[in-house]
Amino acid sequence: MKWTITKQQEGLMLRKYLQENHKFSKRMIKHIIHGGGEIRVNGIIQSVRYELKVGDIVTVKFPEEKKGAMMIPEKMPLDILYEDDAVLVINKSPGRAVIPSYIHTTGTIANGVLAHYENQGLPYTFHPVTRLDRNTSGAMLIAKHRWSHSILAEAQKSGTISRTYYAIVEGHPEQKTGTINAPIGRKDGSIIERTVTDAGKYAVTHYTVLKEFSRYTLVDVQLETGRTHQIRVHLSYIGHPLAGDDLYGGTTAHIDRQALHCHQLSFDHPITGEMKDFSVDMANDMKQLKKTFKAFKST
């Protein structure tokens, strides 16, 4: 990264310049200094207390990114919605885990993205911002390097990244528009399952009924928080589990995965600040589920 100091920035300390003009967190600056990176002014490594002058050229070299043992590049088709030097937005297919684990050691989104980077000669590791469950489909945001990930992670915490989902639930919610405000935590005795519990973390989900079918209901869901399995847990909690979600009370009779699809994703670009907005059509298996059951009411 390289920038030239202007009259407007003259007199700023290097640390303040990086924080205010390029959204470097204190943690990121420390990581660069102590993790093997470099911060130079006019080719010379300088203290972050250095006072900048007009015409100074600031360069930042990030430390080499280390990849985990299972982060192995693996060529696979990726449905890329958008890509630039800082971010990657993909349309994730259902049935594919996001990161490798002892259950899914290969064939994950991470493996495919690393192969995509390798093909471009990029030294990055995998930095997911908006993760999706293995069987959830739709738009997913990935930061390409540690800098953009740091900025987007803060945006995620502050709630400025917007995600909206289509969910097909069992039955017909009595309230056609509602907000579920119920804390979510890990279920006792399980490392996977979550539940509504007073000991859990604050979690808020907003939903609106779009169309009702003979057995199911299509709802539009917006997350205010991003807890693990939040939509699945919350909709099951109000008595309407997702179709296909047998972990939380749904039946797999007509679809073999939870009927959940992230159809809208918007965020401020971490470097330019430009608003980015993406929409993704519903996955085919969810479309087929809608066709199977006759619609009898629209709202």
Image (cartoon, helix red, strand yellow):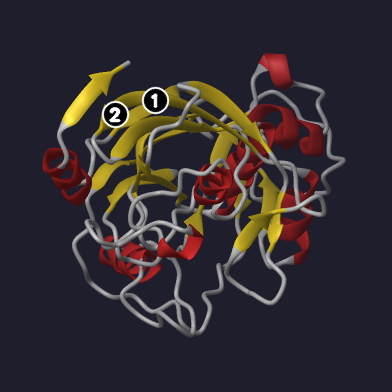
Task: Give the quadrant of the N terminus.
Answer: top right
Residue 292, position in %: x, y?
A: 13, 44
Q: Nearer the viewer, mark 1 or mark 2?
A: 2
Observer-nearest residue: 53 or 282? 282
Observer-nearest residue: 262 or 18? 262
Residue name at image x 45 percent, y 52 percent? 144
Residue 197, position in %: x, y?
A: 75, 53
In the rendering, which numbered label is found on residue 212?
A: 2
Q: Which residue is mark 1?
A: 209
Label 1 element class: strand
Distance from disc 1 to disc 2, alpha carbons, whole Å, reads 8 Å
Residue name at image x 37 percent, y 40 percent? 171
Residue name at image x 30 percent, y 40 percent? 216
Say above or below: 269 vs 201.
above
Residue name at image x 54 percent, y 54 percent? 229
Observer-nearest residue: 279 or 169? 169
Left or right for 188, reference 148: right
Label 2 element class: strand
Residue 76, position in %: x, y?
A: 21, 68
Pointer 1 and pointer 2: residues touching (CB < 8 Å)?
Answer: yes
Say above or below: 275 vs 62.
above
Task: Give the quadrant of the C terminus.
Answer: top left
Left or right for 167, reference 79: right
- What amino acid is found at the position of numbered circle 1 in the picture? Val
- What amino acid is found at the position of numbered circle 2 in the picture? Glu
One can see residue 162 in this view: no
